[in-house]
């Protein structure tokens, strides 16, 4: 029959492409089976020798989603409000931080862009005011004359670059952690999606992802001034009465309930983890803030000391607000062990510029403590013994070797431009994943079997041909998924199962139409011709609409929904091709070669 | 084998009964949704979910009472697939690891000889849940709008668009209603999560598939039988395509049923939605979509 040469060509080409794309997956599984049979040492050797080949295979296989192979999925958000506040630097005032917090709430409420909300909020307070007063930056061409619109654009570029940098940093940290095939993707303008197959230690990953790694060196507070502040503080709460109750219930100090006084001139006191928040509340009142010496603030220690009754006690330490040196100057970091106690610590070396500054700072503060602050917590505040001119320093007081190693990783990959918040986290254990795979495969096979038998019973030869198309259909779907480097997820498998059910629809439409045409008295050949032709518009309309739905699922869905949408799209394309082109060629061949062996039941 | 070879059912004649059935189902669904509220899963509500795999079977009620106090509020606990797998959902706002520690240490105390493994954890922040909900709503709305436009373009008749979209809304609302009503009655989770949104849109696609095939035949018949009245022509078209409608529904139902039975716990709610959706979608394309088109055509002709 004319035209079938072209169709056969298409089928062969499509099949060849499918095999080409599925070949690595097949080969990879064969290799994995082979490796499993080897002893561990042989397996390691084999993997070593064939590393290049295995890696290139792995890059091209149809990969399984985390729900099927187990692992951890985390969605992180860059703290844009904090970033915007920090960009203002010393220019920030109460108005700005107020505007930022209002805008941040509103952007969450209205699901709108934070920066747009911020500009709107700022303008609503004073239509003539300019944001440029906070963001003057000659290097970025932001002058006092810059309009609020220009500032908004500037802030948005800053946000994008902060997000990109955060992604880079997370990638480095994750690579150092040693996860195979991690996936780190940008989502929207302030989110990052991290997928880590096979990860077991969730705790470590969380701190690895979230740690901003802002390393600061600060001087401790002035001993005398700070001591007198601490004394005033305790006295204030000794005589303090809750304003709304003039009963005599408050004979004891609310501060001493939660904070144990300390003897050191740099400490406010000790508190258990449960009480730290309450302490900060008590210290935040305006009266106390007024008592606080100028340029001084308090910070908690990062790791606790054991209390008398075995409870953990954190120290509240007085430090200067001014940051003398930041982590940018750190060139190298490594885990070392204190030779005397064999306790792990992180030793760092600075670049020449940092070393010079560090020398000056230590030289001018011999005998006084310098606080090493990471992510807002004081790790250590050693007393400076001598001027340190070689740029060396170390972080002590760590919680063990693992913390030391992670800290080195975090320090080396650099500081995050803004804090990250975990919005969503999902983990699937490997065994559950394996169960899901077998459940999914079983349903495909059983579903396929039932439909195949039904089709043959109902449509005879036609049904058999449709079954052949169905089988090819599934191979095509897998091929398309592999070609687009899609990831097969559990909902994706559901999508395949569903397409099997719907895939026969095109054939049902055609075969029913052929039967109808036969009833009008047409010959088999003419009926087939008319059946295919007349069914076409219904097939196209029905599939195009479903395809639209799949596109919408793909554009709005995240994670599992996307996976489902991809298989649905692949399924529609594959089933149209197999139902229209492949069955037609087979039907034509059978009607032509052997007269009328085809039956549609 | 041939079913419905030359059927001659009076579909358009039974519209009145269909209206009553649909109206009752629809109103019952809306009432259930309004009074009981949609049963959102953690995707849309936020919260923490843990699946624990015990060595032997456990008692859910016992576990719930022992975990209520340490977690600050009674957690939702149900079996997950088998007697030894348990899903625990809590609104406790503490740090993930802390909440997990509370749960594992308490169940270890409760069942000292029945060790448990945490095989799955899901944590969704409230803000993220809000975003997911919004995204899902958008997806459904866009799907309906685009379908309306596509049918308008292909069939050049707004009544077809209206009929198809009304049938879709009918199907989705009723499935939601069934989920709300059955939420506490069935032994598996019927909570509305992301996978369910995918199921809804698939139902939309399926129902539409069916409807479009019928519409296509109406269009074809109106070209072939020019003198025929609209109502009998719609009836003829429904009968002409009946065989196909039933066969496709059956094959799809087979597969979805298999998915429901063998697909594992994670896909239970999803395949259940599809199961109802396919039955409803078939019904609505036979009795709702075309009925509305007939009704709307009558009205537009009169005015």
Image: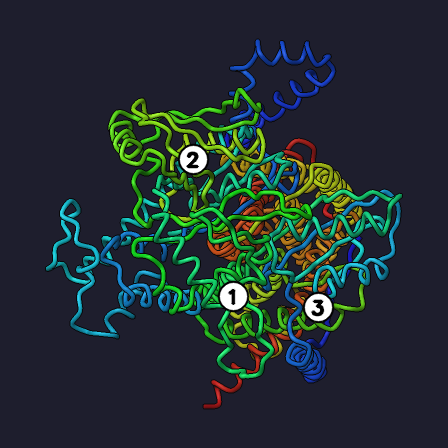
Circle 3 is placed at which residue position? B179
Say which quarter of the image contains residue A580. Answer: top right
- Where residue A566 appears, as percent x and y from the top left, is 54, 46
Secondary element at image label 1: helix
- Contact between labelled residues 3 and 1, with CB atoms less than 8 Å apart: no
Secondary element at image label 2: loop
Q: Residue at x 62, y 64 (%)?
A: B207
Residue under mark 1: which chain is it in? B
**Does B142 sit above or below residue A244?**
above
**Does A130 sit above or below residue B262?**
below
Circle 2 is placed at which residue position? A382
Number of numbered discs on residues:
3
Would residue B109 be found to the left or right of residue A225 on screen?
right
**Does B225 sit above or below residue A559?**
below
Q: Which mark is residue A13?
A: none
Query: Can residue A2 be seen?
Result: no
Q: CA distance from mark 1 to mark 3?
A: 17 Å
- Contact between labelled residues 2 and 1, with CB atoms less than 8 Å apart: no
Q: CA distance from mark 1 to mark 2?
A: 56 Å
Nearest the viewer among B53 and A340 is: A340
Colour scheme of the rendered structure: rainbow
Tags 1 and 2 on a common chain? no
Q: Which mark is residue B137?
A: 1
Tags 1 and 3 on a common chain? yes
């Amino acid at each position: 029959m004319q035209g079938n040469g072209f169709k056969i060509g298409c089928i062969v080409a499509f099949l060849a492409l499918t095999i080409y794309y599925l070949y690595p997956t097949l080969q990879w599984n064969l290799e994995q089976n082979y490796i499993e049979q080897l002893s561990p040492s042989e397996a390691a050797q084999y993997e070593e020798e064939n590393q290049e080949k295995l890696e290139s295979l792995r890059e091209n296989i149809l990969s399984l989603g985390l729900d099927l192979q187990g692992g951890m999925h985390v969605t992180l958000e860059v703290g844009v409000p904090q970033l915007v506040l920090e960009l203002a630097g010393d220019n920030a005032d109460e108005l700005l931080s107020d505007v930022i917090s209002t805008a941040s709430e509103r952007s969450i409420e209205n699901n709108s862009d934070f920066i747009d909300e911020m500009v709107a909020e700022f303008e609503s307070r004073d239509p003539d005011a300019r944001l440029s007063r906070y963001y003057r930056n000659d290097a970025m061409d932001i002058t006092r004359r810059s309009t609020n619109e220009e500032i908004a654009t500037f802030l948005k570029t800053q946000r994008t670059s902060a997000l990109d940098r955060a992604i880079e940093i997370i990638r480095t940290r994750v690579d150092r952690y040693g996860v195979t095939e991690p996936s780190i993707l940008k989502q929207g303008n302030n989110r990052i999606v991290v997928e880590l197959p096979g990860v077991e230690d969730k705790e470590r990953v969380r701190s690895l992802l979230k740690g901003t790694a802002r390393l600061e060196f600060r001087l401790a507070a002035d001993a005398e001034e700070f001591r007198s502040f601490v004394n005033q503080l305790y006295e204030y709460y000794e005589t303090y009465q809750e304003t709304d109750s003039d009963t005599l219930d408050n004979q004891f100090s609310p501060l001493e309930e939660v904070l144990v006084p300390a003897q050191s001139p740099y400490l406010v006191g000790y508190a258990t983890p449960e009480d730290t928040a309450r302490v900060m509340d008590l210290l935040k009142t305006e009266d106390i803030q007024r008592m606080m010496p100028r340029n001084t603030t308090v910070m908690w220690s990062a790791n606790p000391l054991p209390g008398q009754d075995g409870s953990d006690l954190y120290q509240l330490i007085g430090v200067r607000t001014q940051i003398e040196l930041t982590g940018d100057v750190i060139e190298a970091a490594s885990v070392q062990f204190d030779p005397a106690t064999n306790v792990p610590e992180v030793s760092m070396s600075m670049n020449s510029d940092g070393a010079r500054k560090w020398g000056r700072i230590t030289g001018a503060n011999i005998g006084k403590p310098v606080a090493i602050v990471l992510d807002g917590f004081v790790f250590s505040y050693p007393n400076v013994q001598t001027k340190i001119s070689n740029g060396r320093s170390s972080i002590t007081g760590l919680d063990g070797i693992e913390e030391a190693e992670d800290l080195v990783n975090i320090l080396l990959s650099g500081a995050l431009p803004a804090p990250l918040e975990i919005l969503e986290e999902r983990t699937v254990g490997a065994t559950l994943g394996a169960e899901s795979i077998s459940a999914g495969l079983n349903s495909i096979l059983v579903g396929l079997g039932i439909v195949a038998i039904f089709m043959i019973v109902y449509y005879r030869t036609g049904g058999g041909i449709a079954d052949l198309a169905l089988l090819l259909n599934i191979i095509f779907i897998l091929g398309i998924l592999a070609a687009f480097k899609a990831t097969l997820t559990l909902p994706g498998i559901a999508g395949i199962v569903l397409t099997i059910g719907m895939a026969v629809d095109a054939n049902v439409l055609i075969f029913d139409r052929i039967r109808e045409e036969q009833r009008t008295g047409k010959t088999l050949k003419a009926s087939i011709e008319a059946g295919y032709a007349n069914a076409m518009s219904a097939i196209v309309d029905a599939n195009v609409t479903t395809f639209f739905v799949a596109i919408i699922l793909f554009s709005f869905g995240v994670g599992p929904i996307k996976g489902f949408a991809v298989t649905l799209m692949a399924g529609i394309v594959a089933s149209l091709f197999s139902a229209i082109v492949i069955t037609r060629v087979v039907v034509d061949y059978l009607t032509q070669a052997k007269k009328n062996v085809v039956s549609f039941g | 084998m041939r079913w419905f070879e030359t059927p001659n059912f009076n579909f358009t004649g039974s519209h009145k009964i269909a209206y009553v059935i649909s109206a009752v189902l629809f109103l019952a669904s809306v009432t259930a949704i309004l009074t009981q509220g949609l049963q959102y899963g953690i995707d849309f509500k936020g919260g923490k979910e843990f699946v624990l795999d015990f060595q032997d079977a456990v008692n859910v009620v016992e576990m719930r009472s022992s975990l209520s106090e340490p977690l600050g509020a009674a957690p939702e606990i149900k079996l997950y697939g088998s007697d030894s797998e348990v899903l625990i959902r809590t609104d406790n706002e503490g740090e993930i690891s802390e909440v997990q520690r509370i749960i594992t240490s308490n169940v270890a105390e409760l069942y000292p000889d029945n060790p448990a493994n945490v095989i799955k954890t899901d944590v969704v922040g409230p803000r993220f849940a809000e975003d997911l909900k919004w995204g899902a709503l958008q997806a459904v709305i866009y799907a309906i709008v685009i379908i309306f436009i596509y049918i308008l373009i292909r069939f050049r008749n707004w009544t077809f668009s209206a009929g198809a979209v009304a049938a879709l809304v009918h199907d989705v609302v009723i499935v939601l209603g069934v989920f709300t009503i059955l939420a506490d009655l069935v032994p598996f989770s019927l909570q509305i999560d992301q996978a369910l949104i995918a199921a809804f849109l698939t139902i939309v696609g399926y129902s539409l598939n069916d409807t479009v095939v019928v519409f296509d035949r109406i269009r074809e018949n109106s070209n072939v039988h020019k003198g025929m009245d609209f109502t009998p022509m719609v009836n003829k078209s429904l009968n002409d395509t009946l065989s196909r409608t039933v066969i496709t529904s059956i094959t799809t139902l087979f597969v979805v049923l298999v998915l429901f039975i063998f697909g594992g716990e994670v896909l239970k709610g999803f395949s259940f939605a599809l199961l109802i959706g396919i039955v409803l979608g078939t019904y609505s394309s036979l009795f709702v979509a075309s009925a509305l088109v007939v009704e709307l055509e009558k009205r537009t002709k009169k005015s």
